[in-house]
Amino acid sequence: MLELRLVQGSLLKKVMESIKDLVNDANFDCSSTGFSLQAMDSSHVALVSLLLRSEGFEHYRCDRNISMGMNLGNMSKMLKCAGNDDIITIKADDGSDTVTFMFESPTQDKIADFEMKLMDIDSEHLGIPEAEYHAIVRMPSAEFARICKDLSSIGDTVVISVTKEGVKFSTRGDIGTANIVCRQNTTVDKPEEATIIEMNEPVSLTFALRYMNSFTKASPLSSTVTISLSSELPVVVEYKIAEMGYIRFYLAPKIEEDDEENKS
Amino acid sequence: MLELRLVQGSLLKKVMESIKDLVNDANFDCSSTGFSLQAMDSSHVALVSLLLRSEGFEHYRCDRNISMGMNLGNMSKMLKCAGNDDIITIKADDGSDTVTFMFESPTQDKIADFEMKLMDIDSEHLGIPEAEYHAIVRMPSAEFARICKDLSSIGDTVVISVTKEGVKFSTRGDIGTANIVCRQNTTVDKPEEATIIEMNEPVSLTFALRYMNSFTKASPLSSTVTISLSSELPVVVEYKIAEMGYIRFYLAPKIEEDDEENKS
Amino acid sequence: MLELRLVQGSLLKKVMESIKDLVNDANFDCSSTGFSLQAMDSSHVALVSLLLRSEGFEHYRCDRNISMGMNLGNMSKMLKCAGNDDIITIKADDGSDTVTFMFESPTQDKIADFEMKLMDIDSEHLGIPEAEYHAIVRMPSAEFARICKDLSSIGDTVVISVTKEGVKFSTRGDIGTANIVCRQNTTVDKPEEATIIEMNEPVSLTFALRYMNSFTKASPLSSTVTISLSSELPVVVEYKIAEMGYIRFYLAPKIEEDDEENKS
């Protein structure tokens, strides 16, 4: 028997909005430690990893580890029916082929039950080792989203270059070129407005903007985003989820011949 | 000669927005008691009945009963040109084949006259007898609209079931099932937030969500909606219009074989 | 060398939004007195004239007169990437075939450079003589925009008739006719809400609403619009740009046989 009661139900709504366009079907894994998901995007280029730790739930009962295959588009349709202030409970009976989402309004005057069929999905869980990164950039999530969107109007790829002074996002396209530099800046009024760069060595990597723009749909989950870069590893774009977990997107850099000339 | 001056012109704008997608052409009937309309929707399934009583107008002159056939799409285009704070006057000369809508801005600095051709429309006025209903539900109009919209993302029909405890809205579709229960609740801060159930006997009826969603376009007219249900009669979905009248939508229940199993 | 620094960068963004749908490619002319543009719309019916005087820039360096051909759609894509509070600097080296737009955030933490290829555009600069107009109407720009939009839902052309009492905008179409009268009104709380008419002789002229609606895209630049009418000249629709210049649209009246009957 599974019963997970999340008082801040809007978090789950936002999680779905941030991954439903990237991933069609996925297994949600539930264990005593938390509710998690790991899935490749439909073109097998990007990887999403979600964790909601059990401590973040008001009530968390998971008698045995289970893996529930869900169509994320359908799950999103159902979660859209929850109010932003609703408490959401995820329920499944042992051996059942359905999952139930229960939405309770804050006043308890309106109770909704949405039942969805589960699916069998083959999936392989990748171990993602902890790694050392050449550079880690933490910046306001809205600013990162704005930059990715702005650059998409000029080109298809972004070169992210980190130096001690700041992080540069560059693109080029038919109509011209664009370079946006965000300076390291830790002396801001609100800590979430800081741009903080931890750098072991300079790095400059190229990524498809289409995926970056997709990742930024998670911006409503957190006011900051952390981008971890290494020339030998996929980039990690991470959004913390309140006190209870995270959503991480992994994307391999593009190997481009004109990389060198974009670095300047 | 007809001259009806409505200070709160936005009411007429909202009335048009709530029926223009349901009804193409209709006769507006004008008599000494009020301005009214009765019309079937274009597929002859739902009936709309509108009444604006003469007392609600600042000035109401209607020398003799007349029936004015109008295309509601065109009328809506004209009324959209009125400002939300404008005073609207409906004018027609005896025997004229046009009607004039006059819009006066609150400061009287801007005066607009829109003249529209009238149409000949065959219509039959149905007498709608007062009836006893098994159950009458009054609830916030925004909540009813939200429920109909939410259920439409899952299924095509809604089963409305009333018991003493509350009203349940259910649907089922390819991706699963949904049940939303609103409890009777009269102890709210604002009377318009109450959900009040008057029940003579339990009732459970099935309706097409497409029509329900169309009716909820009248929600801006009133903060509450009244749903009157009887197993032998069409449902009535009623929105009061300020102190001066109402808009009522009538829709026959669907006779479905799986009705029984949805009742639970 | 050209370097023009505009603290209120949003003005340039608004200028682009107001002309990019009307004009595809145009030469921006830069001299010691200011930054200007004169261009016909793509169907060679309307003329746009823009002036931003050098005094309006925080820093204005233009070593020699130059004319820079730009695609306005591409320029608009780039300027959309500037924040509303950003300082915008336009830069070009002598003899370069590119122009650079630099956007600085108010805190200087984010600096963006967008470089765009220039184009060779044949253009002829028309001298527009100062002229006497029969009537000049100054009114709130939002009201003029609303009237043009409203009338477009009824007809394709607008007859603008000025008398001492006010200005009348009329149209007719398949569904009926519309007349909107704005009265001269100088006793308003805020000067920008006034409707002021200077008239030497009554005038009544017909214009294509499609162009008028296009001109009103400049409304965000100024709270008032000035419409100068003469039966022998194109109408001038002018929006002031802060203290630093203007954007003017010129459009020849339509010669219509039914002009007389619309005047009433």
Image (cartoon, coloured by chain):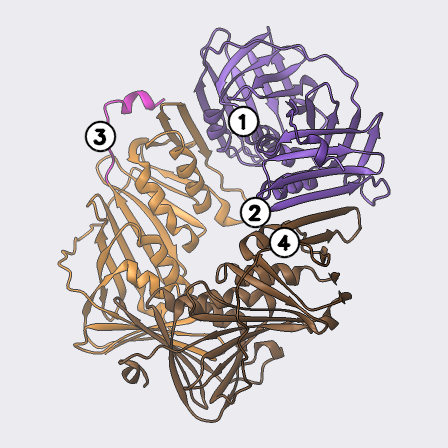
Chain colours: A orange, B brown, C purple
Q: Which label number is shown at residue A20?
A: none
Dots 2 and 3 on the same chain? yes
Sort mark 1 into few (<14), some (14-19) or many (20+) by Cα contacts within 10 Å. many
Badge 3 amino acid: Ile
On the image, the x and y values in percent for residue A143 come to 46, 42
- State the image quarter where residue B258 is shown: bottom left
The numbered dot on residue C22 is 1
Residue drawn 64% across the image and 61% down it: B12
Task: Determine the CA span between mark 2 and mark 4.
Answer: 49 Å
Residue C84: name its quadrant: top right
- Magenta stretch? A252-264
Three-letter amino acid code of the residue under disc 1? Leu
What residue does disc 2 label?
Answer: A189
Chain to which mark 4 belongs: B
Disc 4 marks which residue?
A: B79
Rounded to the nearest angstrom, the CA distance separating label 3 from label 4 is: 59 Å
Amino acid at the residue labelled 4? Leu
Classify mark 2: residues with Cα within 10 Å, few (<14), some (14-19) or many (20+): few
**Residue visible at 75% across and 36% down in the picture:** C139
Q: Nearer the viewer, mark 3 or mark 4?
A: 4
